[in-house]
Amino acid sequence: MSIFTRRTFLQTSGAVAAGAALPLGAPAFIRSANAADTVKLGCLFSSSGTMANLEGRLNYVAKMAAAEINAAGGVNGKTVEVVASDPASDWPLYAQVGRQMLTETKVAALFGCWTSVSRKTVLPVVEQNDGLLFYPLHFEGDENSKNVVYVNSPPASSVLPAVDYLMSPDGVEAKRFFMIGSDYVWPRTINKQLKGYWKSKGIEESAWKEEYVPFSFSNFQTLVNQVRAFADAPGGKCVVVLTVVGSSIPDFLREFANQGITATDVPILGLDMVEADLEGLDTKKLVGHLNCWAYLQQAKGEANVKFLSGWKDFVAKEKVPFSADVAIDPMVSTYDAVHLWAMAAKKAGSFDVPEVRKAFAGLSFDCPSGYKIAMTAENNYVSRGVFIGSVNEAQGFDVLWQSKDTPKPVPMSPFG
């Protein structure tokens, strides 16, 4: 797997700007891009900065999916090679590296971004170059580009079912909501949609409160005190809707537990919270807090058994610097994305983006979640199942609820 870092980006940019002779004067990853027997895929996932513990895993699972495809004979007579990168949780750098991968490394598709702010920086790059970006995170929706494959779910298929659950007798019959998010487009848009959703149900504005913190924020003592005061006020059961990202998630959970607030007192619905955020935490104090995703590690079925076994073997064989025993939704979505791209390229008999895009309609794949995910000709959204999980003592999530099937994606929210 090639590694494409900030340093190599700067070195390469300098060489090209100076007119260095290619191919002999170019770095190795550019020379190998011209190999006739390989097709390259580019990864835009950070291995440093606030997103490192989460995004870093996705570079490796993309390589694992490529290895499976190559073991089955490759695609259109070529071996799939993954070119990884480290945009260092620096949003503009995602766009710069993505552009170079498309125009110089000539990757057939990009797989990447975790935060919506990084995806937003890459969007004009893939549209200007008619590239393809497979985006593996559930997100705020309200976007529909022919150059982006939205592999995960918009709010109508993830956030709203979880909020409905919390408001129902099966949940905690929540009446009031304290929203805490990192200060960027995803939390603010999700919360805007939630407020519109609650208004449509006749809930008064006094029933919610929202606060935002910078990326990498870690000192949540004052905010947790505010949550406690809000929860103690009359008006019904309060829940926290948490949309902080990266290292802020375990920091918030740790402060919540340190102040002795349990899920029975005030449940947290962590919309970006995954199994990896619980590593190193005493989850006995966090049992019962919730998340919602299109995959949980406890999902049943042969596809998940195969995926988890494959990941464990891959971690050992490739000496991957992440746990062999932890799998998270965006890993599975990235794994699905590489396989969907390979299926489309094979169906098209081509790696050209317009031909691959035409082949999306009718594709389906047996996802480790246990659902058969699918695409239609209507848009580039992938229909998936939905899980609501509950933190257990073993630093994982038990499945509390899951959808019967894969709801049709609704890209544009009526509540925004």
Image (tube, rainbow, N blue to C red):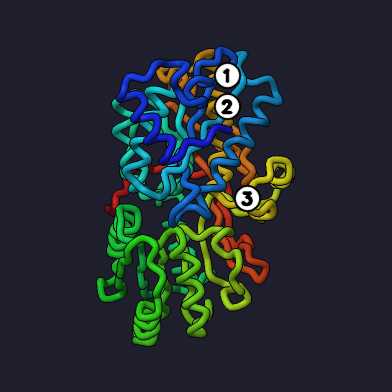
Give above or below for 406 relative to 38: below
Q: Position of residue 16 (x, y in %)?
A: 35, 24
Q: Earlier in the sequence, mark 1 or mark 3?
A: 1
Disc number for residue 81 = 2
Verify CB contact (< 8 Å) between mark 3 and mark 2: no
The kind of residue on which mark 1 rests is Thr
The residue labelled by disc 1 is 38
Give above or below for 2 relative to 103: below
For disc 2, the neighbor class at 10 Å (few under 14, some 14 to 19, many from 20) is many
Q: Residue at x 56, y 51 (%)?
A: 403
For the residue pair 133 and 367, the one nearer the viewer reads as 133
Q: Residue at x 34, y 37 (%)?
A: 95
Between circles 3 and 2, the one closer to the viewer is 3
Q: Residue at x 30, y 73 (%)?
A: 209
Mark 3 lies on a secondary structure that is: loop
Q: Quadrant of the N terminus?
A: top right
For the residue pair 306 and 71, the one nearer the viewer reads as 71
Verify CB contact (< 8 Å) between mark 2 and mark 1: yes
Q: Position of residue 213 (x, y in %)?
A: 32, 66
Give above or below for 144 relative to 284: above
Q: Earlier in the sequence, mark 2 or mark 1?
A: 1
The kind of residue on which mark 3 rests is Pro
Cα–Cα gap, marks 2 and 1:
6 Å
The residue labelled by disc 3 is 321
Q: Position of residue 253 (x, y in %)?
A: 49, 72
Cα–Cα gap, marks 1 and 3:
26 Å
Mark 2 lies on a secondary structure that is: strand
